[in-house]
Amino acid sequence: MGPRTQLVTTHRLFGSAARVFTYRASAPASAGVIYAVHGFRGDHHGLDRIISQLPGYTVVVPDLPGFGASSSMTQAPHDVEGYARMLDVLADELGLGPGTHLLGHSFGSIVAARLAAGRDFASLTLLNPISEPALESSQALLARLTSGYYALCAALPARIGEPLLRSKLFTDGMSLVMTKSADPAMRRYVREQHLAYFGGFHSRDTLAEAYLASISHTVGEYSRGIGVPTLLVGGLQDELGTPATQEALRSTFAQARLVMLEDVGHLIHYEKAPETAAAIRRFLSPLSA
């Protein structure tokens, strides 16, 4: 099942030409609106498989400034605060009121949590929420090496730095590390998705700035200020959010439930999209009613 027909709009915010992709509900009547925030080095395409499983909802997915079809911001930093401010203003422009359901994946989970801590939503759904600092996790060495790699590529001449950051070898390496499925078709799908969209960043400086933000913060910095019903969906093999730290994170929310999926890590939006969407539907159904 493919994604629904999109309505694409452009919004000038903080110096960025931000592109927004809206998937209208295909059911006779919409069950509600979901405002979704994608992860680092992704764009709206990354949520396609989940969106296709939520036909009853209108889903609004902006490409974060500096990624996908959105240019970088010139009047705000590409960090958690900068993105949350931008998404807050964008929500006003789009007329997204307090009845809107907010969703974030990976780095987008941190940004969404920051946004939910300062703006009214009907609910919050976090996919692969960042529950422990990358620099203190089992992936600390990889995070430091990657941060240094991004900083080096940003400092090198463009003719050298750009190809390095968009290299097929680097992208394939990330796919190999992150994909847990043993299914060849799924592994091929993930690789193709990363090759198609992993290089869709606007500038090397933006990429380095956003990556530093992604490894320097967690959802837990904002969770105690969030009072709306919250759903956390994680992967049992996710190095960026172990079952223990996910449960600890859940306990910091006023009202939250945790669903942990088997045989998957940090790519539940690809590898476990039907199961993830089913968890979202179960969570949102009574709230929408």
Image: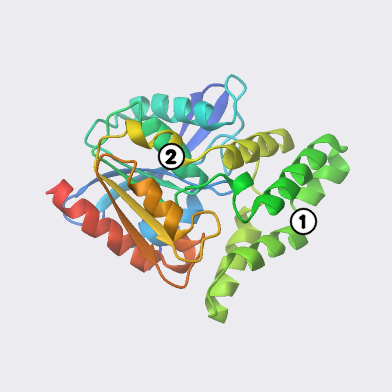
Quarter of the view holding residue 219: top left
Separation (CA) of disc 1 from disc 2: 33 Å
Quarter of the image with the N terminus is bottom left
Quarter of the view holding residue 260: bottom left
> Mark 1–mark 2 contact, CB under 8 Å?
no
Among the two numbered marks 1 and 2 on one chain, the one whose residue lies closer to the N terminus = 1
Residue 108 position within the rendered picture, expressed as x and y whole percent measured from the top left: 48, 43
Q: Is residue 124 left or right of residue 262?
A: left
Q: Is residue 134 left or right of residue 282?
A: right
The residue positioned 58% from the left and 73% from the top of the image is 187
Q: Read off the residue under disc 2.
A: 220
Residue type at mark 2: give it.
Gly
The residue positioned 77% from the left and 56% from the top of the image is 167
Question: Is residue 73 visible from the viewing direction of this image?
Answer: yes
The residue positioned 29% from the left and 32% from the top of the image is 96
Q: Is residue 279 left or right of residue 29?
A: right
The residue positioned 31% from the left and 34% from the top of the image is 226
| Label 1 secondary element | loop
Q: Residue furthest left?
A: 289
| Label 2 secondary element | helix
Q: Read off the residue under disc 1.
A: 167
Residue type at mark 1: give it.
Ser
Residue 164 position within the rendered picture, expressed as x and y whole percent measured from the top left: 81, 50
| Color scheme of the displayed model | rainbow
**From the viewer's perspective, is residue 86 above or below residue 251?**
above
Residue 156 position within the rendered picture, expressed as x and y whole percent measured from the top left: 86, 38
